[in-house]
Image: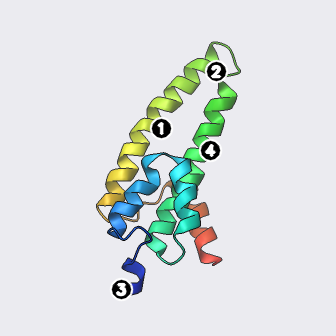
Amino acid sequence: MTEENRKTVLGVTENLEALICYALGWVTGLIFLLLEKNNEYVRFHALQSLVTFGTLHAMSFVLMFIPILGWLVAFCLSALSLILWVVLMVKAYKGERYKLPVAGDFVEQQMAKK
């Protein structure tokens, strides 16, 4: 990576900023996608956070309107989201560009358009 790619908006290391992209789910993903213009590593994690947790949040919201079965599925989805959230934060902090199967492919397509 070049020195330009390592610079971040907050002035912290890029792996820490990538971790922060996941901290509040899609919210911090959106914030860092808007703030971070030059660091591709951070932008990748910001967009992946936005897409992944935005989708999971929307799915959970819809499922909450379906009595019993929807609530059960939403609860299971939330538990899996928590595990995914921790895994993604650890991978980002370790400096890995960990790509999720569907969301990661979409993110890479969007990043290539830039």
List x then y, in percent, for residue 98: 41, 60
Q: Are marks 4 and 1 in contact (CB under 8 Å)?
A: no
Distance in Å between CA atoms under marks 1 and 2: 16 Å
Q: Earlier in the sequence, mark 1 or mark 2?
A: 2
Q: CA distance from mark 3 to mark 4?
A: 34 Å
**Residue 2 makes an appearance in the image:** no
Q: Position of residue 40 (x, y in %)?
A: 48, 74
Which residue corresponds to the image point at 57% horizontal and 26% vertical from the top-left? 74
**What is the C-alpha distance between the residues marked 3 and 2?**
48 Å
Residue 88 vs 11, above or below: the answer is above
Q: In the rendered structure, which disc, 4 or 1, sits on the residue that comes first in sequence?
A: 4
Kind of residue at disc 3? Glu
**Residue type (three-letter) at the residue carrying disc 4:** Thr
The residue to which callout 2 is attached is 70
Amino acid on which disc 2 is placed: Gly
User: Which residue is disc 1 drawn over?
Assistant: 81
Of residue 11 and residue 103, the one placed in the foreground of this image is 11
